[in-house]
Amino acid sequence: MIHYLFSFIALLDRGWRRSGCFLYKPEMDRTCCPSYTIRLKASDFVPSKEQQRVSKRMQRFLDGILSVRKSDGSIDAPNSSNFSYILAPNETTSIAAKEFLAGNLEGSNKAEQYTHYLSEEIGNAVRACIECGEFPSDVQLPKPSVKQVVQGKRKLLVEGSEDLLYSSNISFQIAAALRRANNDVQCLKSSEHSKQELSKSTESTPKFIAEKLASYLNHLSETCGLLVRACNGHINLYSTTKEAYSDVLKESPTGSGGKKSCLKKCSGRPQGKRQRFEIRLNRSSFDPEEYALYRRYQIKVHNDTPDHVSESSYKRFLVDTPLIYVPYTGDSTVPPCGFGSFHQQYIINGRLVAVGVIDILPKCLSSKYLFWDPDLAFLSLGKYSALQEIGWVRETEVHCPSLQYYYLGYYIDSCRKMRYKAAYRPSELLCPLRYQWVPFNIAKPLLDTKPYVVLSDFDSLQNEESAAANSFEDHMELQHDDSFQEQDELNDISVDEDEEMSELDSEDSDDGSDPETSSPTAAAIDDGGVSNIAIGLKEARLRYKDLQQAFGPTERRYLETQLHRYVRAVGPELSQRMVYSLG
């Protein structure tokens, strides 16, 4: 059975992907959005600062420092959409806020540091929108700033707004940044898919963005006595009471007037309880609780209609699997969980909040899909689960040395929602023609120029140039002092390099020839090498050579054409080990 799983890995390494019991592979040179298989060697993984922040945020949440707020202050009913997240009083986002809490700041510096604190709160709201997918993650957005509204300008505003204290125009800056990014990408990408996708992310007006950010700032009403409203694209902060209004503006030379500030009031809040967190790894099977979470996720995050999220479609997509379960054998060839398809459940306080659908194979963990509680979007559960899966591979490799890689599925450079996969470094992309793995840092500049690239051509070229450079250095170390001899050696090297380049140019010529079909193996196949392919007929399995006489000339010619395509798709080796089913 393990040999069967190795065959499945071989398909992954030729660009195939699983969806339920079906295997599919895009026609890379024909599709508008080529999909490159991406993987990572877990032992080489180095987390970025953003990924470290995701882990720390989750840990703060579990420790009760980063809290999820509902009307009753609990997480026991995540079906509500009224969740927001707050920083507990002892874990503010800046030293300035802590000093303000203690009342240690004086005069104008106190007001300046407080506006800095509010700016950081809006910055947290921007990051939450990015994690929810409402803002693109690969566009650099400006840093929010909050300004205090002076008394004179306050009178010029709408009647009844005399309690307006602070305002921010960050929504206008974000809208401008998104428009610029849209224009830049439209100049580089001509595919209709890219344009349609970008238009969705850049249709947001300053008014819409302000309303979205304001929804993440409702906690300031309790913690700071400030009411947040979106007004024509501006984010305005009002005092909820006259006392709050006077406390915020009160300044004294000694700084004692700040001890009744809104942050001071926060310090009396009790610290949250530690959340109970566990990760369970179950074999793939239908679970009503998982399906209910999947349904909510698809409707709220991907805007699917309820009719399209049926139980049967869920089973076909994420429960059914062609993989045979291989149990633990007690040695280092199989991990304790065994091999097969699994659902990894993330549970907080007994409630299911995320499910990762994965395949655990002799060589890798292949991530298929993840769905999570939309009310906990600020926890970045997608990124957190990927870090957990990478960590699992690293730990398991100690006991099962063959299991080294983490497969993230397809990377589509023209799709913004797929680009996050490249953040797990150092990753590799699969060449769509020669099925060689190419470092992402080599592939990315090429994909920026055109969507379909034979990546191995450029990887080989870079290796040849590196080898030539090393050869040149070796010759320089051994050369004599004679300048004429030195010149001769340099000429010899350049001739060798030219010959190597000529060989490369002839190999990569655009004459339409396919290296696969021109190779000896492919030639052998065209001459009748399909005779040993196993053909499945109902419950029988026979070699094609034993069935040839059962077909007429026309049927035989058609079937052999299909078998040749089949061999090119799965590879000569796999074609001899798999069954080509005719029904």
Image (spheres, rainbow, N blue to C red):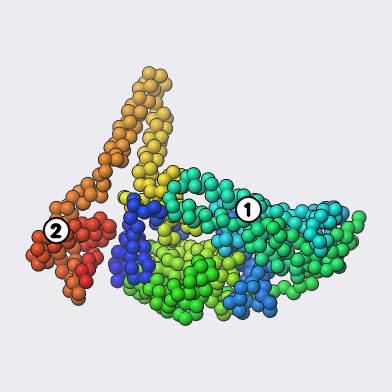
Which mark identifies residue 557? 2
Q: CA distance from mark 1 to mark 2?
A: 60 Å
Q: Residues within 10 Å of mark 2 (few under 14, many from 20)?
A: few
Which mark identifies residue 174? 1
The mark that comes first in sequence, 1 or 2, is 1
Q: Quadrant of residue 68?
A: bottom right
| Residue sitting nearer the eye, 429 or 155 | 155
* Residue at 66% across, 68% down: 85
Q: Which quadrant is home to the C terminus?
A: bottom left
**Which kind of residue does numbered mark 2 sit on?**
Arg
**Which kind of residue does numbered mark 1 sit on?**
Ile
Location of residue 427 in the rendering, given as x and y in whole percent from the top left corner:
45, 53
Q: Quadrant of residue 318?
A: bottom left
Location of residue 365 in the rendering, given as x and y in whole percent from the top left corner:
42, 65
**Marks 2 and 1: in contact by CB < 8 Å?**
no
Is residue 195 visible in the rendered image? The answer is yes
* Residue at 49% across, 44% down: 187
Is residue 276 visible in the rendered image? The answer is no
Location of residue 416 in the rendering, given as x and y in whole percent from the top left corner:
50, 55
Q: Residues within 10 Å of mark 1 (few under 14, many from 20)?
A: many
* Residue at 75% across, 70% down: 222
Count numbered badges in the picture: 2
The relative height of residue 199 versus residue 271 in the rendered view (above or below) is above
